[in-house]
Structures are given as C-alpha cells and as structure tokens.
C-alpha cells in the first residue's frame, strides 16, 4: 500500500485527532473486520472543516476555469497513482471484483477530466448580454449581463454502490469543484479505506496545485451524526447524495428546516420500468429475455438503473417468460455490497412475494450463501399492481416484477407511476409511431427514455440525464451524471450597469476568454 491508512478524517490540510472509533470496514460474506478503526470527526473538527471551506470559497470560486481545471486533472492523476491501493483494498471492503475497481477508477478520472475540459473551455457559464440602449423609448434600457456562479461549500455523501465514481472524488465532488464550490465529503461506512485512499489523493492534488486550504475536507462519523451536522451548518449551501429514499428524504427535511433552506440533490430510488409491446415479443422472445436478464443481474442488481419493473401484454410473451424463468433458475447468487443491503434485498423480495396477487415466476435454484443475493422474478396482473402502491418501492438487487395487462391499462398505469431515472420502451417502428400517448406518459415520469435497449450502463457525456421526478431524485430538474451536473451547484447572477473592467472576464465586452455567449 502506498497510502498509509490512519483511520482519521481530512480537515483541510490536517488530519483529525478524534478518539471515538465509529467503525471498521467489514468484508462482505466473511464478516472479517479490517484495520484500522475509523475515528469519528469531533464537533470541533466539523466546525473547523466548515470554517476552512467558508474561507476557501471566495478564493477558489474566483480562480480561472483553467486553474481549477488543473486541480481536477491533478486529482485524476493522483488517483491513477494509487490505483493498486484501490485494487488491493476495494474488493476487501465491497466484494466488487478487481475489474470493477479498475473500471470505476477509469470512470472517476474520466469524469474529473471531462469537467476539467468543460471549465477550461468556459462557455458552460451561460453568459448572456443585453447591452444598454439609452435612447430606448419610453424608458432607456440598462446594461444587463448574467452568468452562472457557484453556490458555496457543498456537502457530498458517498454512495455505497459506487465506492469511486459516486464517492469521495466522484461525480458530485467533481461537478461541485468544477463549479467553484469547496466540498466537504461524508465518507460511507461501507468503504472507509477506499475513502481514505482517494481522500489522500485529493488532498495531495490540492497541495500540488496550491489550492486554498479547505477546498476539500473528508469526514468520518456517518451521515446521521456528522453528515447531519454538515447539512445543518450555515456554511453549507447544497448537498449531493446517493442512497436510500429514507436517507435522502431525511436530508431534504433537514435542509428545508434550516433558517436558510438549501437545495439537496439526492438520487434515491428508481425501479426503471421497461415496457414491452407485442411486435417486439413476436420478433424474438428469447433474445429479449437474455438482454433483460443481463441488465437485471449486472452488478448483482445494485445499480440505480436496475430494471425492477416490466409492463407487458397479458396475452403474449409466454416464451419470453419461460426463458426468463430458466435463466433465473440457472442464475448464480452474487455477493452484495454489505450485510445491510443484503438484508434489505431479502426483506424487499419477501414483501413482494407475500403481496396479494403476486406470483413467483422463478427463483435462483442455487442457495445464496452469507452476504449473497440471488435473482428472482415475480408476476402480477396490472389490476392487482394498481392496488398496492408499495410495489413501486425499489428492490435493490437482481429482482423484478412483471406486470401484465392491456396496452390501455399499461399506459394508464405508467401515468400513475412514481418518478423514475429511466423508462425503456421495446417496440417496433410501427408500434412506436402509434405510441405517442405512451411515450408522453413515460417522458412525464422519467429522466431518460430508452428505445429497444436496457437501462443499465450510464454514458458519462454532455447530454446524459441521470435524474428524474421524485423519488428517483429530490429535484427532477437536475442530473448527477454528465456535464449538466455542474448547474446543480450554481445560481444565475446578473450585473446591471457595471463598468466593463469590473465585470467577470466572461461578461466583458471584448470577450477575452472567447467563450460562446448569448448576446
Ligand atoms: P443509506 O442508508 O441511505 O446511506 C447513505 C449515506 O447516507 C450514509 O452515509 C448514511 O450514513 C447516510 N444517511 C442515511 N440516513 C441518514 C439520515 N437520516 N441522516 C443523515 N444521513 C443519513 O444508503 P446505503 O447505505 O447506501 O444503502 C441502503 C439502501 O439504499 C440500499 O439497500 C438501497 O435500497 C438504497 N440505495 C439505493 C441506491 C440507488 O442508486 N438507487 C444506491 C445506494 C443505495 P449512516 O452511516 O449514518 O447511516
């Protein structure tokens, strides 16, 4: 290990001195605990991290995009320098295989460099210019210029299911830093060593690129204790979160009840409906079942885009269901991220199986070992589905519920679905042409519409939308993946009648940065 694991928080450029052990990493399945014990940040240390973030904000937010881009690229390089540490520690803490560790490291550094390119180029600030017209009648027009500016320090909660790409230096942190916001990370108890490895890399990068102290801190002690204190702290101006609906809504409540309410961008719960129309079933049921099963079981179903709900005609698809049954029965149990997630998954499956009207189509024939989750497929008629709102709750694992009814019933049921990250439509071109109402209903409920494909696999790019109406996220106007994620941590500011030299360069008459502007 290049990175010494000390078990302490990063408070700006110092390490914490707390003495209360709040947890140790536990290897899923074996239950073996790993050293070191992680020490909870004290209230004084939380206060120090917040006051450093407050002091860093005016400096950091006024650095040029090019300088901040240098910091993001340095983080990416420092993470790459410790990839062997990640590969050594990660599988012990998460049961995720080495290939996933390497792949997720690649995605993480790719995201950091994507945001670096965005802010170096500079046009993302959405500069708008309305020049003065003193001769306008009946009243003169003033000079008005606007652009996006950072909100202030951001609290980022690490995700259990993306220990790199949505944790310490993941998408929320990268987009907040890119916007010009200092970040205070709350480490997840499931992978504290990974957090320390990446946190140390971020701090090295901050020092190497001369960032103001407090641009980054990372705290141990859990969300309910330390995390709540950060969210309620007056310095914090926004929150990024990926996790459970209960956790996300608790943070929304805390943020809304502050003397100054602040936005929470929580990605919580989505069952990602897949609608299959008759023409596609006739085209090849077995291949469809194989594609669907691959998406369902990817990463032991522990993705926010897992397809947990299928709508299909009541009178078709017997071969699709037969194939799905045989794939499920022959499937293999997989190790889940931690014992809590494993138990929640088992409980969620048991709840669905026991719900009136639900039939178990198939369960994995192999018995799940300790810490493992196995695939399962349930079916229900659409009439019964509509009687049980709780069937819309996420089963976080490789299980799905197939709902069967007429096309009219399916469209009506979709109108009443909770908000989703994705909605997939399997249809022939002719069916698509006749499905305007259905597509509109799906678009009302989801952030990303997929045609003849499956929802897992989220491309990180400019046009990705990884968001959706509640409870998929707390704010359906946003995305947590892709360059648009930066706007979560900004607000528009207008300058009226300012002398040119006093304007930010983005708004100056000569456009010295050469960015795209609306003028
Ligand atoms: P979680 O229980 O919501 O925890 C995530 C983070 O939020 C942890 O740091 C936790 O801290 C904190 N937290 C939880 N409740 C809080 C509260 N009331 N106030 C402040 N902070 C709070 O999620 P998880 O541990 O990652 O997984 C649990 C379940 O969440 C899964 O079984 C799954 O159902 C769901 N999940 C969904 C997604 C998705 O993308 N859809 C992703 C991950 C998890 P503590 O250590 O103090 O609890």
Image (spheres, rainbow, N blue to C red):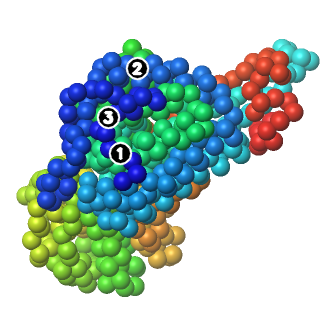
Q: CA distance from mark 3 to mark 2?
A: 15 Å
| Residue position marked by numbered label 3 in the rendering | 8
Q: Is residue 147 left or right of residue 244?
A: right
| Residue position marked by numbered label 2 in the rendering | 48
Q: CA distance from mark 1 to mark 2?
A: 24 Å
> What residue is rendered at 92% in x and 18% in y?
135
Rendering coords of residue 387 (x, y %):
17, 52
> What residue is rendered at 69% in x and 40% in y?
66
Q: Is mark 2 within 8 Å of ligand 1?
A: no
Viewer can see residue 228: no
Q: Secondary structure at mark 1?
A: loop
Q: Secondary structure at mark 2?
A: helix
Answer above or below: position of 446 versus 101: above
* Pointer 1 local density, CA inside 10 Å: few below 14, some 14–19, many at least 20: few
Q: Is mark 1 within 8 Å of ligand 1?
A: no
| Residue position marked by numbered label 1 in the rendering | 4
Q: Quadrant of the C terminus?
A: top right
Tell me the mark number nearer the camera, choosing from 3 and 1.
1
Q: CA distance from mark 3 to mark 1?
A: 11 Å
Of the pair 360 and 442, the residue shown nearer to us: 360
* First in residue order: circle 3 vs circle 2: 3
In the rendered picture of this protein, how many numbered marks are placed on residues?
3
Check whether the beta carbons of the residues at disc 3 and disc 2 lie within 8 A of each other: no
Rendering coords of residue 271 (x, y %):
31, 56
Of the pair 346 and 394, the residue shown nearer to us: 346
> What residue is rendered at 28% in x and 23% in y?
42
* Pointer 2 local density, CA inside 10 Å: few below 14, some 14–19, many at least 20: some
Q: Is residue 296 left or right of residue 68?
A: left
Tell me the mark number nearer the camera, choosing from 1 and 2.
1
């Amino acid at each position: 290990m290049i990175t010494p694991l000390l078990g302490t928080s990063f408070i700006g450029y110092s390490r914490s001195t707390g003495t209360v052990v709040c947890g140790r990493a536990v290897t899923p399945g074996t239950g073996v605990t790993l050293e070191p014990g992680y020490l909870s940040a004290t209230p004084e240390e939380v206060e120090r991290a917040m006051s450093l973030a407050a002091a860093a904000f005016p400096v950091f937010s006024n650095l040029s995009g090019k300088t901040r881009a240098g910091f993001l690229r340095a983080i990416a390089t420092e993470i790459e320098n410790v990839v062997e540490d990640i590969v050594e520690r990660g599988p012990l803490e998460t049961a995720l295989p080495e290939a996933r560790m390497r792949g997720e490291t690649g995605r993480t550094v790719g995201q950091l460099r994507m945001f670096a390119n965005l802010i170096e180029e500079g046009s993302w600030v959405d500069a708008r210019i309305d020049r003065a017209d003193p001769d306008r009648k009946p009243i003169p027009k003033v000079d008005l210029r606007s652009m996006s500016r950072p909100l202030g320090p951001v609290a980022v909660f690490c995700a259990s299911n993306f220990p790199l790409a949505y944790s310490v230096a993941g998408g929320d942190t990268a987009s907040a830093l890119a916007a010009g916001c200092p970040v205070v990370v709350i480490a997840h108890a499931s992978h504290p060593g990974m957090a320390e490895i990446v946190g140390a890399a971020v701090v090295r990068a901050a020092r190497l690129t001369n960032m103001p102290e407090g641009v980054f801190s990372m705290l141990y002690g859990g969300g309910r204790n330390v995390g709540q204190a950060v969210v309620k702290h007056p310095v914090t101006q926004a929150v990024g979160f990926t996790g459970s609906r209960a956790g996300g809504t608790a943070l929304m409540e805390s943020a809304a009840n502050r003397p100054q309410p602040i936005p929470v961008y929580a990605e919580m719960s989505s069952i990602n409906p897949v609608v299959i129309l008759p023409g596609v079933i006739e085209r090849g049921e077995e291949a469809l079942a194989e594609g669907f099963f691959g998406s369902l079981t990817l990463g032991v179903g522990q993705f926010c885009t897992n397809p947990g709900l299928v709508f299909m005609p009541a009178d078709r698809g017997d071969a699709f269901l037969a194939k799905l049954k045989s794939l499920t029965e022959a499937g293999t149990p997989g190790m889940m991220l931690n014992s809590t997630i494993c138990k929640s998954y088992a409980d969620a499956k048991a709840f669905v199986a026991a719900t009136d009207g639900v039939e178990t189509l198939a369960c994995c024939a192999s018995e799940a070992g300790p810490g493992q989750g196995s695939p399962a497929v349930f079916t229900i008629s659409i009439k019964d589905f509509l009687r049980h709102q709780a069937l819309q709750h996420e089963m976080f694992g490789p299980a799905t519920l197939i709902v069967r009814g007429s096309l009219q019933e399916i469209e009506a049921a979709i109108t009443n679905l909770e908000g989703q990250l994705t909605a997939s439509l399997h249809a022939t071109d002719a069916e698509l042409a006749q499905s305007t109402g259905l597509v509109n209903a799906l678009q009302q409920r989801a952030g990303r519409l997929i045609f003849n494909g499956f929802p897992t696999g989220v491309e990180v790019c400019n046009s990705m939308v990884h968001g959706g109406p509640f409870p998929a996220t707390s704010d359906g106007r946003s995305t947590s993946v892709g360059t648009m994620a930066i706007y979560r941590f900004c607000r528009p500011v207008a300058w009226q009648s300012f002398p040119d030299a006093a304007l930010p360069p983005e708004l100056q008459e000569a456009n010295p940065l050469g960015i795209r502007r609306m003028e």
